[in-house]
Structures are given as C-alpha cells and as structure tokens.
Image (cartoon, rainbow, N blue to C red):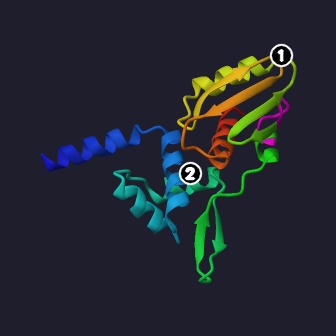
Amino acid sequence: MYFCSQIEFLYNNKAMKKEQRLKIISHILRNEVIHNQDDMIKSLADQGIVVTQATLSRDMKELRIVKKLDKNNLYVYELPEVSQSDITSKSGSDILSIEFSGSFAVIKTRPGYAMAIAGEIDTANMPEIAGTIAGDDTILVIPRDGYSREHISLAMTLYASKSN
C-alpha cells in the first residue's frame, strides 16, 4: 500500500507543470539561502516536490540562476538581475520596450501586435499578473497585490522565453 501511494505521488508530482516548478524555485531563491543543488532539492522536497538533479539542473539553466559569493565568502545561488533588454531580446521584434510605473508595466509593441501579445499573457495565467489592457501598440500589465516590479519582470522574462 505504501509503495502504491509513493508511485501515485511521484506520478502526480511529475504532472506538475514546468512553469509552476520554475516559479517555486524562484520563490525559494528569493526567500532562502541556497548553497548547492542538494540544498535546493531538499527545499523542494520540503514543499512536497521531488525532482532529479538533472531536472533541477535544466530548470536552473532555464532560469539563468547564477552562483555568487555572499558576505561570508560562500557561494550561493541567486536569480539574475532582470533588465528590460532581457525581456525585449527574448521576445524577438514584437516587443519593442518595457517600462515600469510603480509596479505597473507598460509594454510597447510593433503596431497591431499589442492585443495578440496581451491575449497570450492573459492566457498564460501567470499568478503575478491580474490582467492586461491593450491598444494597438501598447499593453498595460496590471500585477496582482503583493507582487513587485521584480516579480513582474521575472514573469515577463519567463513568458518571453516560452513564446520563442
């Protein structure tokens, strides 16, 4: 009986969407000090998520996680600094720029592309984003309460990397 429930757990866990796992990894890195992949695997396991080292390695590569020296001269994993150029370069030529006003993001697109891109952002059901409003070449991205500019930037970077 125990073996069956373990198999069922592992099966259900593998069905977890990659995007959800990436967001959980990002959350862990923002809230915990992670020195190595074993630490990350343990933190994920504490949340009921079982991953192999190979899967974690691929996820960390996709998130572009970096190792930096902390104030104690120990290496720690960190999320990369997210810049406007990261988002626009990953989106090809459809997204021309992104600018923030408070936690709101204003995205400039090629003429005629804003509504389609806003629709894709809304369909992606990102937990950080409540919704979008689009015109012909401008999108207003409205974050959910409690999400900062950095959260929105990371979400948009992940969205842009998935849409290519």
**Magenta region includes residue 104:** no
What residue sits right under mark 1 in the picture? 112
In the image, which residues are magenta? 89-97
Q: From what the image shows, is residue 21 above or below residue 78?
A: above
- Residue, far bottom: 72
- In the drawing, does residue 85 fall left or right of residue 117? right
The quadrant where residue 99 appears: top right
- In the drawing, does residue 41 fall left or right of residue 122? left
The quadrant where residue 118 appears: top right
- In the drawing, does residue 41 fall left or right of residue 118? left
Residue type, mark 1 in image: Gly
At 36% from the left edge and 53% from the top edge, which residue is drawn? 47
User: In terms of secondary structure, where does tag 2 sit?
Assistant: helix
Residue type, mark 2 in image: Asp
Total numbered labels placed on residues in the image: 2
The quadrant where residue 131 appears: top right
Q: From what the image shows, is residue 161 above or below residue 44?
A: above
What residue sits right under mark 2 in the picture? 59
**Magenta region includes residue 92:** yes
In the rendering, at what x and y percent does residue 6 appear?
A: 24, 48
Q: From what the image shows, is residue 24 above or below residue 161?
A: below
In the rendering, at what x and y percent does residue 8 appear?
A: 26, 41
At 38% from the left edge and 52% from the top edge, which residue is drawn? 50
**The N terminus is located in which quarter?**
top left
In the rendering, at what x and y percent does residue 18 appear?
A: 51, 41
- Residue, far left: 1
Of 39 and 121, which appears nearest the observer?
Answer: 121
